[in-house]
Structure formats: structure tokens, C-alpha cells
């Protein structure tokens, strides 16, 4: 009998499939959008590259050294430096084809050696915010470093400059004072240079020593959002039982050999199957196209856990609609209920971003156990034993909620 009722519901949806298919496909469309934005890629720059235009009017050793610093190490990944004439640089800034224009003035090196003030100009693109600020802070660091270096090493720098101006290779008598000056400078600064006041210690942890799974932000966010979509899909489908009552289809069915209990049970199975179809379709697409890695044993655990989760979510929505008086009343309240469950359960917003008092009460939301379980399976590769608490709670909820809904529906429709 239940099979015949299920067949009736399926045939009725297939007779006018547009709305039903759109509802099932909405989570899939949202998943594709999230995947394009958040899915991990082979090579992905965290920071945007700054296009810096440079006008070197000094053409000195110091200006060339500053330019070369932009092309070394991590700065080479952050900046794309192009030397241009002054007029062309300003034109490119006005056309929004660069982030900043750095102008090194004539006499920049001589001013540093003579310890006189010199102005380095940075023209920022007003149409951009982050990239010009990166250029400004980097240039400030360079200028501050050059100022401190030429002040501290003023004596040796002047000696070296005079040797270059002479245009001849220095003899031993000229080099000796320079070596003495450098040694004196080093001795004065040795307390700051050796050992350094600040040390950076790097430690590489081998994967063999401590295996940590890669954190997949796409899988993390999708685990929550798909549960919320699951509840909204179930909400839309659950209203169908009131449509059958309003159209008097329910009374024609129960006056025959079909019991109210069989009718309600068939509706709950239809809810479960429809929600499971949309749910598993989303994860199939996510696993195939958006680089979510999962082992074969974990797939089985995920399938079983998801089925229990869907059954418990079906119970929540079924019990809710069994307690409301009309379809309009249910549809008016359901969205608020789903949003509250999703927020407290970490489906809408990750729990890490919520206030402390919500984190403390999150365990009372059935959504929390579902979202947390999916994340631990997909991201942290938890097994059955580690997820025992999640399985037990969701199984109990699925049994109690669906049984309670059947009892309340039967009392409602028999009265």
C-alpha cells in the first residue's frame, strides 16, 4: 500500500516536473557557485600582484639597488615593476593600468651620502585601495632602511664614494682606512648584530611524523549550507500533505483500505527520498569537480551518516508540520525555525565566527550534529568509532521525531 502511495506522489510530480526539478536543483546550482569561488586550486596567489611603475631620474647605484629589491624573493611575487618615462607613468595611472608610480629624484644618492633630505614621490591610483597601500608601506620601509644605513655608516660610505669618484683602483694606503672604519663600525654595532635581538626559528614538520589533512574551505562551508538547503527543501515538500487535505484527496484515500498511518508514512518516505536525491547529487558534483578528497572507506561512512542525517531532518520538518493547524501557518513559521536551527547549529555561519554563548548552546540543535559530523568525515577523516556520539544522537532523533510526527498526524486527520 505504501508503495502505491509513493508511486502516486512520484507520478503527480512527474506530470508537472518543472517546479519539483527546480527545487531539487537549487542546492546544486548553489554548490556550483560556491565551488567556483571557494574550491582550492593548484596555484592560487593569496595577495593580488601590485603593478608598480618606476621613474628613475637618479640612475645611481642606490636607486638601482632599490629597484632590484623589488625583483627579489617574495617581493618579486607581490610586485610587477616596470620602468617608464614620467609622462607615460602618469598617463597609465590615470587610465587605471597601474597601482602606483614611484619617482626617484635626481641627486637621491648624493643626498643620502651627504645626509641631506631628499623626497621620493609615490603617486597612488585613487581607483584602487589595497594595492597602492602595499606599495606605499613597502617604499616607506625601503626609505627608512636607507636612511638608517647611511646615517650609521656615514664614514665608510663617504670613503667608498670618494674612491668611485676618483675613477682609479684604490691602493693599499687608501683601502686601509676603509677597513679600519668598517671594523670600528662593526665593533660598535656588534651588540645589535651578533647575536640579533630577534630570531626567527623555522621548523618543518614531516608528513610522516605528523599527518594533518589539508583544510578545504569549500568542503567546510558546503557542509553547513547543504544542511540548511536540505531543511528548506523538506519544508517545501512537507506542505504537500496539507494540499492533499485541502483538495480532499486525503479523505478519499483514507475512506478506502488505506490507513492514515500508511498515508503519513508514505509522505515521510517521499520527503526522505526527494531530499536524499538532491543531497547526494550535490556531493557527487562536489567530489568530482571541486577537489574534495575522500577515501573509499570514508565514502561508505559518509553515505550511512548522510542517510541518518536526512532521516532526522525529515523528522524535524514532519513533526513541525504535524503541530501547525494550516499550511499557511506552517509556511509562515518554518523559515524562522530553519534559520534559528541553522544559526545555532553552524550551518548558516561557522560556529567559530559566532558569539561564545551560541557556541555553548549549539549542541542542542540537531543541525549541529549533522554539520559537525559531515565536516569531520570529509575534512578530518573521522571513522565510525570517533563519530559514535553523532550517529547515536541522530538515530535517536530520527526515530523519535518521525514517530512523533506519525502519531500527531494520525490524531489530526482522524479528528
Image (cartoon, helix red, strand yellow):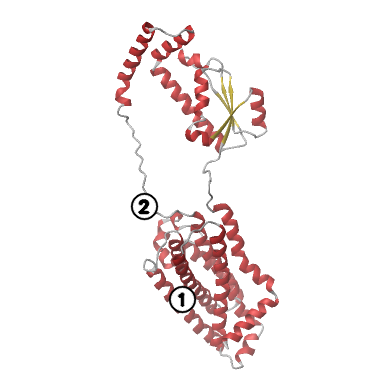
Is there any visible trace of residue 234 in the rendered image?
no
Query: Which one is in front, 320 or 374?
Result: 374
Disc 1 is placed on an element classified as helix
Disc 2 is placed on an element classified as loop
State whether residue 24 is above or below residue 65. below
Q: Which percent across, then down, holds residue 312? A: 48, 73
**Residue identifier under label 2:** 208
> Which residue does the image show at 41% across and 21% down from the upper left?
149
State whether residue 310 is above or below residue 84. below
Query: Which one is in front, 187 or 165?
Result: 165
User: On the image, which quarter does residue 254 sit in?
Assistant: bottom right
User: On the image, which quarter does residue 160 sit in?
Assistant: top left
Q: Which percent across, then down, holds residue 96? A: 65, 35
Query: Which one is in front, 258 or 327?
Result: 258
Q: Quadrant of the C terminus?
A: bottom right
Q: Nearer the viewer, mark 2 or mark 1?
A: 2
Q: Give the number of the disc on residue 272.
A: none
State whether residue 385 is above or below residue 10. above
Q: Which percent across, then down, holds residue 21? A: 65, 70
Q: Quadrant of the N terminus?
A: bottom right
Q: Give the number of the disc on residue 398.
A: 1
Is there any visible trace of residue 120 in the rendered image?
yes
Crowding near the residue tagged with mark 2, few <14, some 14–19, many ≥20 C-alpha atoms within 10 Å = few
Q: Which percent across, then down, holds residue 246? A: 65, 82
> Which residue does the image show at 35% across and 9% down from the upper left?
177
Query: Which one is in front, 381 or 334?
Result: 381
- Counting residues from the start of the chain, the first of labels 2 and 1 encountered is 2
Distance, label 2 to label 1, CA atoms, is 40 Å
User: On the image, which quarter does residue 182 sit in?
Assistant: top left
Amino acid at each position: 500500500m505504501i508503495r502505491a502511495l509513493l508511486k502516486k506522489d512520484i507520478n503527480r510530480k512527474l506530470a508537472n516536473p518543472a517546479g519539483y526539478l527546480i527545487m531539487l536543483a537549487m542546492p546544486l546550482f548553489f554548490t556550483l557557485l560556491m565551488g567556483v569561488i571557494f574550491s582550492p586550486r593548484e596555484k592560487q596567489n593569496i595577495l593580488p600582484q601590485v603593478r608598480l611603475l618606476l621613474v628613475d631620474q637618479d640612475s645611481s647605484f642606490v636607486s638601482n639597488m632599490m629597484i632590484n629589491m623589488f625583483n627579489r624573493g617574495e617581493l618579486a611575487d607581490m610586485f610587477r615593476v616596470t620602468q617608464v618615462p614620467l609622462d607615460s607613468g602618469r598617463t597609465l595611472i590615470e587610465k587605471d593600468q597601474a597601482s602606483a608610480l614611484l619617482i626617484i629624484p635626481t641627486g637621491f644618492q648624493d643626498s643620502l651620502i651627504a645626509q641631506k633630505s631628499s623626497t621620493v614621490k609615490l603617486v597612488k591610483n585613487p581607483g584602487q585601495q589595497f594595492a597602492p597601500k602595499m606599495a606605499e608601506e613597502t617604499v616607506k620601509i625601503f626609505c627608512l632602511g636607507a636612511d638608517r644605513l647611511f646615517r650609521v655608516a656615514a664614514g665608510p660610505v663617504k670613503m667608498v664614494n670618494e674612491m668611485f669618484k676618483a675613477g682609479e683602483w684604490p691602493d693599499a694606503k687608501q683601502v686601509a682606512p676603509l677597513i679600519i672604519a668598517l671594523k670600528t663600525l662593526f665593533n660598535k654595532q656588534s651588540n645589535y648584530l651578533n647575536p640579533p635581538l630577534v630570531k626567527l626559528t623555522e621548523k618543518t614538520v614531516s608528513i610522516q611524523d605528523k599527518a594533518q589533512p589539508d583544510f578545504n574551505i569549500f568542503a567546510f562551508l558546503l557542509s553547513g549550507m547543504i544542511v540548511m538547503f536540505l531543511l528548506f527543501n523538506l519544508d517545501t515538500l512537507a506542505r504537500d500533505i496539507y494540499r492533499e487535505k485541502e483538495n480532499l484527496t486525503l479523505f478519499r484515500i483514507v475512506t478506502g483500505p488505506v490507513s492514515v498511518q500508511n498515508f503519513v508514512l508514505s509522505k515521510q518516505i517521499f520527503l526522505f527520498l526527494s531530499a536524499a536525491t538532491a543531497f547526494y547529487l550535490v556531493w557527487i558534483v562536489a567530489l568530482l569537480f571541486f577537489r574534495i578528497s575522500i577515501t573509499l572507506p570514508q565514502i561508505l561512512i559518509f553515505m550511512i551518516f548522510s542517510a541518518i542525517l536526512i532521516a532526522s531532518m525529515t523528522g524535524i520538518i514532519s513533526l513541525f508540520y504535524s503541530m501547525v493547524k494550516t499550511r499557511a501557518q506552517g509556511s509562515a513559521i518554518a523559515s524562522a525555525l530553519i534559520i534559528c536551527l541553522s544559526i545555532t547549529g553552524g550551518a548558516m555561519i561557522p560556529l567559530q565566527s559566532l558569539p561564545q554563548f551560541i557556541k555553548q548552546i549549539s549542541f542542542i540543535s540537531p543541525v549541529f550534529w549533522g554539520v559537525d559530523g559531515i565536516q569531520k568525515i570529509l575534512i578530518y577523516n573521522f571513522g565510525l568509532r570517533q563519530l559514535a556520539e553523532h550517529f547515536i544522537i541522530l538515530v535517536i532523533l530520527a526515530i523519535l521525531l518521525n514517530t512523533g510526527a506519525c502519531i500527531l498526524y494520525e490524531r489530526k486527520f482522524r479528528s
